[in-house]
Image: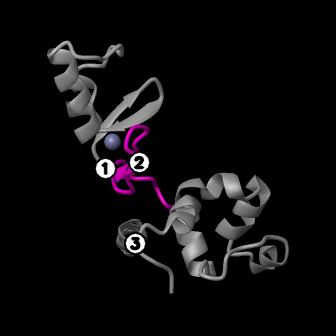
Amino acid sequence: MSLTNQELENKINEWMRHGDIEKMQWAENIQKKLLASSIQRIKQNDKTVLREIVLPKWLDWDLLRALIDRKPVKDTTGRHCILCDMLYDNGIHFNEKFICESCFLKLKYLDVHKQADPMQLPSESEWIP
Ligand SMILES: [Zn+2]
């Protein structure tokens, strides 16, 4: 049985809740972890590819196919905040880094009060929806 997109997202959300970094990384970077030719064969349901690739035990064929077909949905998997090192859904990209909402607000507060913030932070209109 293949997974629906919703089932897959539920699984990924669960990994996130448990802080299962290895699984999260596979979910996020599956396209980089496998060769393009392998991915092509997985899409074609060609299981002989399993002889050539090394997968973690938890990653079965259906899950593998679902991850490869997955359309990444923004803000469902969380991103690593460069300041507090936690995974967050909401925040901004700044100099190609991710800053979570609470850190951003802290920085902004500091900025407003002219304490210490050398960074020019983007406006709220640039927040990820
Ligand atoms: Zn943060």
- How far from the left and from the top, in percent, is residue 111? 22, 17
In whole angstroms, how far apart are the C-alphas of marks 2 and 1?
6 Å
Q: Does 3 sit above or below residue 36?
A: below
Quarter-of-image position of residue 42: bottom right
The residue nearer to you, when weighing 58 against 53, is 58
Mark 3 nearby-residue class (10 Å; few <14, some 14–19, many ≥20): few
Q: Residue furthest front?
A: 115
In whole angstroms, how far apart are the C-alphas of marks 3 and 1?
15 Å
Disc 3 target residue: 18
Count of all numbered marks drawn on residues in the image:
3
Task: Give me the residue at 48% from left, 69% from top.
Answer: 20
Disc 1 target residue: 89
Mark 1 nearby-residue class (10 Å; few <14, some 14–19, many ≥20): some
**Which numbered disc, 2 or 1, marks the residue that appears first in the sequence?**
2
Kind of residue at badge 2: Arg
Q: Quadrant location of the C terminus?
A: top left
